[in-house]
Image (cartoon, rainbow, N blue to C red):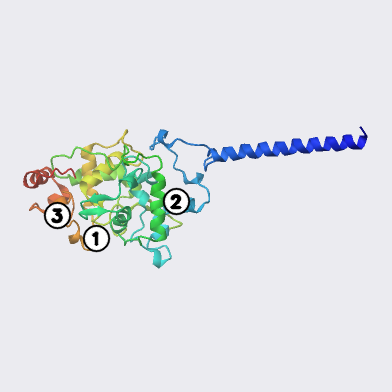
Amino acid sequence: MTYKSLRKKRTTVQLLIGLSFIVVLLLIVFFLFKNEAFETDYVKIDKNKIDPLTADYDTFHLDDSRKSKQIKYGYELFINTAEYLGPNNGKRERSFSGNNLACNNCHLNAGTKPYSGMLIGVINRFPQFRGRENKIGTIEERINGCMERSMNGKPLPPNGEEMKAFVAYMHWLNQFAPEDGKVKGAGYTRIKIPNRAVDLQKGEKLFLNKCASCHGEDGQGIALQDYPGYLYPPLWGEDSYNIGAGMARVITAAEFIKTNMPYGATYEKPELTDEEAYDLAGYINQHERPIKTNPEFDFPDLKKKPVSTPYPPYADTFPVSQHQLGPFQPIMEFYKEEYGMKKTK
């Protein structure tokens, strides 16, 4: 065999080895992708084995796909609502919120903290019947309920960019939730409602000792310096939630306060008793705040109105002051005896 033919044979063998290596490499990559080993987070996850309360909801991990950008925008709207949708955002056509609060002020930790109006699992429970409207409502209608009440503003366009972003973010929060949307920590924790009226003097003392360091003695919170919004939100006054918000009801506010305030408190480690949360809620909500437009049209079926709703009309003859400050047990007993309705808030 000549030197030239030997060299040619060696080159052919090297070429075959190289091609074989490339083919094997391509096959490995193909099967890895086919088996979804390279997903967004690079690990195939069995979502049924992830605890929705301890899962990682950091949007930083999302890629730059169109869907991920929509989720990230929804998160931004949720955390920095005033900057994007508030009255001082610089874009009148997008000033849907009437105050400078953020969704995150009531739904803590970007909607992931248990018993703070947590949003994990919520979207799986919609459409749902709501007594306030006395009909089956969509998640978009529920979001706009917050915009009109807690944010003291106007509804978002149902098919607009912002509404789609909010819904996309809520869908993303729902990724580890069960199909029925029932997750421990939903809503607010129940308290034992004191069988008495709110003690406003005790409420004021508690506020000054427990709340004023963040929300100010005047209840006006601490505003951010560089852009609209608050480090700690105002609890009353023109830039707070209006009387139509759920937080304007003493029982609802007390349930929120019990497991979330002072800041850092949790369901497992509350810092206030039920009675203290009750008196605090009553004191806070006795201050003036915006009046919702046409509050008399809320609750087409007045029997479904929560007993601590602070504004009339009612399906009973108890005075407005009792609906605002209690005692609430006589009102609850009335609805049980008259209408067979068991009311808890």
For disc 3, the marked residue is 302
Which mark, by number, is residue 215?
none
Residue that lies at the very extreme toward the front in this rendered image: 1
Question: What's the distance in space between the residues labelled 2 and 1, CA to CA?
Answer: 30 Å
Viewer-side residue, 234 vs 90: 90
Residue 88 in the image, given as x and y percentages of width and height: 40, 63
On the image, which quarter does residue 259 sit in? top left
Q: Position of residue 61 (x, y in %)?
A: 51, 44
Q: What count of labels does the image hold?
A: 3
Considering only order in the chain, which callout, 1 or 2, is on the residue closer to the N terminus?
2
The percent position of residue 150, horizontal first and vertical second, equals: 30, 55
Sequence order check, earlier mark of 2 and 3: 2
Image marks 3 and 1: residues in contact by CB distance under 8 Å? no
Is residue 11 visible in this depiction of the protein? yes
Q: Are marks 2 and 1 in contact (CB under 8 Å)?
A: no
Residue type marked 2: Ile
Quarter of the figure that contains the N terminus: top right
Up the image or down, 316 lies above or below 202; here it is below
Q: Residue at x 45, y 39 (%)?
A: 56
SS label for mark 3: helix
Q: Amino acid at mark 1?
A: Lys
The CA span between labels 2 and 3 is: 38 Å
Q: Residues within 10 Å of mark 1 (few under 14, many from 20)?
A: some
Q: List the residue tagged with mark 1.
A: 292
Circle 3: is it few (<14), some (14-19), or many (20+) Cα within 10 Å? some
- For the question of whether residue 261 can be seen, the reply is no
